[in-house]
Amino acid sequence: MTLPFLLEIGTEEIPDWMIPNALENLHLLFEKLAIPHESVTLDATPRRLVLRVDGLPERQADSEERVLGPGKSAPPQAVAGFARKQGIKPEDLVVESTPKGEYYTFTRKVAGRRTTDILAEALPGIILGICFPKTMYWTARNGPRFIRPIRWIVALLGEEIVPFQLADVHSGNLTAGHRSLGAREVVVTHANYVERLRDHYVILSAEERRVRIQSQLADLLVKSGRVKSDPALLETLVYLTEYPTPITGAFDPQFLELPEEVLVTVMRHHQKYFSVEDAEGKLKPQFVAVMNIPADPEGFVRSGNERVLRARFNDARFFWETDQKKSLVDRKQDLANVTFQAKLGSYLEKTDRTVALTAELGGDAHAQRAAELLKCDLTTELVKEFTELQGVVGGLYARAQGEPEPVWQAIYDQYKPAGLEDSIPRNRTGQIVSLADKLDTLRGCFAIGMVPTGSRDPFALRRAAQGVVKILVEGKLELPFLAANQSRDREGAATAAAAPDPLISFFEDRIKFYFRDHRGFAYDEVNAAMAAGWSNLPDLEARLIRIQNLRSSPDFEPLAASFKRIRNILDQAGSAQAGSADKSAPVDPSLLEPGPETDLYAEYQRIAGLPLENAISKLRPKVDLFFDKVLVNAPDPRVRQNRLTLLNTLLREFSSIADFSEIVTTS
């Protein structure tokens, strides 16, 4: 007989962005119990985390346990005592061989535990084991910790309550409805759980709440406009509400004189409103708010939202007009009073470093001007009030103050890309300035030992490094961004004799992540291409594309296996042939044996300088026959050395593309 299981953890409102990860963590913790089951369903609202499981056994299967007794040589009294302790006769024991010798053993039947007992024992630990970025006490100091106070717990296995207690809350079959519209206590069963919640204005399914918001948004604006697409805001609202209902509102069209970026930021970040645009994408003096109640018949919610938004827009307009009284360039010296990092100085010092690095990266006069003004908006009232607008405000002010287009666009785009899905700065000036800003932050933080560890990354250095990689690759910038630390030759050898710089290793990891996890190249393709050098990322991308295309050839894997064999032979022959030998040393044709060896050398001469794509089908059979018929480690040392030189020459010919010995082959 199998039973359904329901666990609902009822709390005060959980921050919306923490809920999806909390559900995933709850699922993983439950799976660790290893209780057989058919399916798991996870749901959540701001006030509840829910786990529903189908097909749990009423009790666990019986098992057998081998009990080790005395050794075979033990006196009869000891054997009889062991048998008596197990409740059996001595003749029921068997002798088994173990690594320690022969022993009397007994196989005991162990009855399976009731599933409800297992759950009752484990659930308090599972609930408190859910991982949140931070937790709180709510009963007493050193008491249980959770993201928010736990107010009720529903735990049902079939029709039976799974009994346990956590922080003075007893498990039961009582849930709670909507905070303001539903009952405080609602009796539920497995069969009526979802509908009982709905009766009390709680839509349990996040997907249903999402569809409800989307469909009602479309209905609201079918004639007057369209909602500005914002998937992230939609996801936030799904987990901020239990019974979402969109409503429209309006604001004074005079506010449209402010930049759209300012208006949208106020609506989105501060009020959680959707912006509305017309068919041409121009902002309209409307917004859509999402209530947590089914209707607003008197219009009180609408008017309240309009009143709050009007105040916020008035603040924004005041700050905009006040900030314009002082130009960005006049604000530069004010950056001396804004700390970047205690050991790295002020933002004025960072600005000077960024200007110098911009020039080092080949930035023109526009780029250096943008770098000079890059952080000046940090001193503006608008950014102090709306921190999400850093950079954007600087770009808007630069445009309003007559700075050239490349300059203000570079300032506007300085924080791009915000993630791997975001676009890079729109022009070359912006790309170089953004690189300089990010590289300065990375170099400075690594120099003082602020290296990201685990989940700790207070300066978002991983994102900065990922941004550098994305800009270099997608902007096709062949810049020596590692030159100040360490460079590598085309065969991947470090040119510096010292141990690898931590920042170099950090970038290496980010580059692998970008090409492997974001771009979808196979891990061995990435390893092979990077082993041939990676300081020029557009070149690395081009080589990866070539390798990926070559992989579909039936000759590719066998040839890669041959390259691996060549590498191993050269390594075994000694480091001189493996990489540090005189690379100009020629093959001596007079020492070549007629047949497969001379055929391979002749083929090498024909394909030397040709792309591997054009040579792979011709080269592969010659290499195969060489290894099948020719003894590399010939008795004659001159012949042996000449054959190693031939293999080394062949390996070097294509090592500028990749170290093909890194390719994982099936053979």
Image (cartoon, rainbow, N blue to C red):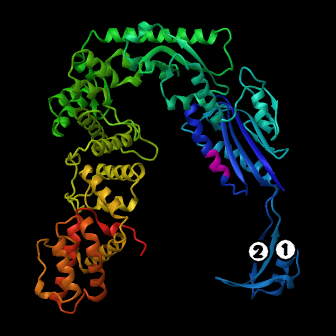
- Residue 218 picture location, percent across and down: 57, 24
- Residue 60 picture location, percent across and down: 79, 60
Vertical arrangement, residue 566 with respect to residue 459, above or below: below
Q: Can residue 517 be seen from the camera position used here?
A: yes
Q: Which of 226 and 187 lies nearest the eye of the viewer? A: 226
The dominant secondary structure in magenta is helix
Name the residue: 18% across, 92% down.
Answer: 636
103 sits left or right of 90 in the view:
left
Q: State the residue lying farthest toward the bottom.
A: 635
Q: Amino acid at mark 2?
A: Val
Q: Amino acid at mark 1?
A: Gln
- Residue 299 picture location, percent across and down: 64, 9
Q: Are the residues at dot 2 and dot 1 in contact (C-beta closer than 8 Å)?
A: yes
Vertical arrangement, residue 542 with respect to residue 104, above or below: above
Query: Which residue is label 1 attached to?
Result: 86
Q: Which residues are magenta?
A: 25-30
Quadrant where the image shows the C terminus: bottom left
Query: Which residue is label 2 attached to?
Result: 67
Quadrant where the image shows the N terminus: bottom right
Q: Secondary structure at mark 1?
A: helix
- Residue 369 picture location, percent across and down: 19, 26
The local crowd at label 1, few if under 14, some if 14 to 19, many if 20 or more residues have their Cα within 10 Å, is: some
The local crowd at label 2, few if under 14, some if 14 to 19, many if 20 or more residues have their Cα within 10 Å, is: few
* Mark linked to residue 131: none
Name the residue: 24% across, 87% down.
Answer: 633
Q: Secondary structure at mark 2?
A: strand
Q: Can residue 142 be seen from the camera position used here?
A: no
Name the residue: 27% across, 52% down.
Answer: 501
